[in-house]
Image: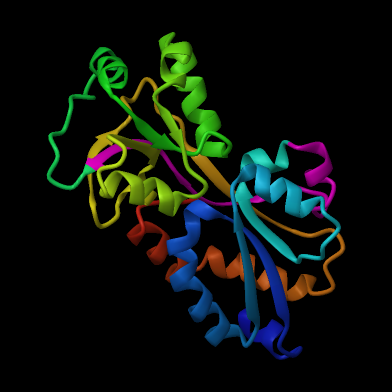
Amino acid sequence: MIASSGSLGAAELRLLAGGAMLNVWAEIKPKFEKASGHKLEIFFGTTPNLIKEVTSGKAFDVGVVPVDVMKDTAAQAKFAAGPTIDVAYVGLGVAVRSGAPKPNIATVDAFKATLLNAHSIASIPESATGYSITRVFSRLGITEQMKAKMKAQANPAEVVAVVAKGEVELAIFLMNVLTAPGLDIIGPFPGELQENVTFTAAIASDSKEAVAAKALIDYLKSPPSVTIIKAKGMTPG
């Protein structure tokens, strides 16, 4: 597919992508561009940002976004009809500043106690990950107690930064994002509470570069991309 699409001429693709996959795209983008001859312009965002961008009327060609984006009726209508293609998924985890003591989260009760004892927690409430975390808090019956502890951040990089600097005690986010310099991962959520966030791909319904967009999605399922996805702490879809 890469070879055949490249023979049709180089395309400039506008991609909408979940911000939690930024490190994945940092490696896949140049490899895809070299292999295909196409160029990628990438807009990164949280789920609400992506829904807003998809429905803004601004042209785009392809999305690799959290599945929650596709649950929005207006956003879903901007993608080609048919099933989406899952690219990667990753679970939730907890991290502290490098060198800080690691609290116990091995069991549901220990995890709940750690959350209730924490002074502050960094995450992105308005995101697919944030929605998953909110569901976990609800299952634990601690929704109200957690409101005062949560320190909302604008993007995954800020979640890492505020905890790495010691400004916030815990980071709760996707495991691949927390695998970063300045943080020590405590571990994933207990199995009974774990929720995966899935990133899925689809072509825009009005893309003028549908062939090249499909070539990108195919490339994401190829061995080079699968290797990168795994190396960045995610599970290929």
Left or right placement of residue 79 versus residue 163 in this view: right
Question: x, y percentage for residue 123?
Answer: 44, 37
Q: Residue furthest front?
A: 167
Magenta residues? 72-96
Would residue 235 be seen by someone viewing this image from the given angle? no
Left or right placement of residue 151 versus residue 187 in this view: right
Residue at (33, 61) in percent of width and height: 231
Q: Residue furthest top?
A: 141
Residue placed most toward the observer, 216 or 161: 161
Q: Quadrant of residue 216?
A: bottom right
What colour scheme governs how the chains and residues are painted in the rendered image of this protein?
rainbow
Q: Quadrant of the N terminus?
A: bottom right
Compared to residue 21, the image places residue 100 above or below, namely above
Would residue 218 be seen by someone viewing this image from the given angle? yes
Left or right placement of residue 148 versus residue 171 in this view: right
Question: x, y percentage for residue 118?
Answer: 28, 24
Residue at (34, 46) in percent of width and height: 162
Magenta-span inclusion, residue 216: no
Q: Quadrant of residue 61?
A: bottom right
Question: x, y percentage for residue 53?
Answer: 74, 54
Q: Quadrant of residue 8?
A: bottom right
Residue at (23, 53) in percent of width and height: 182
Magenta-span inclusion, residue 83: yes
Question: x, y percentage for residue 167?
Answer: 30, 41
Residue at (56, 38) in percent of width and height: 128
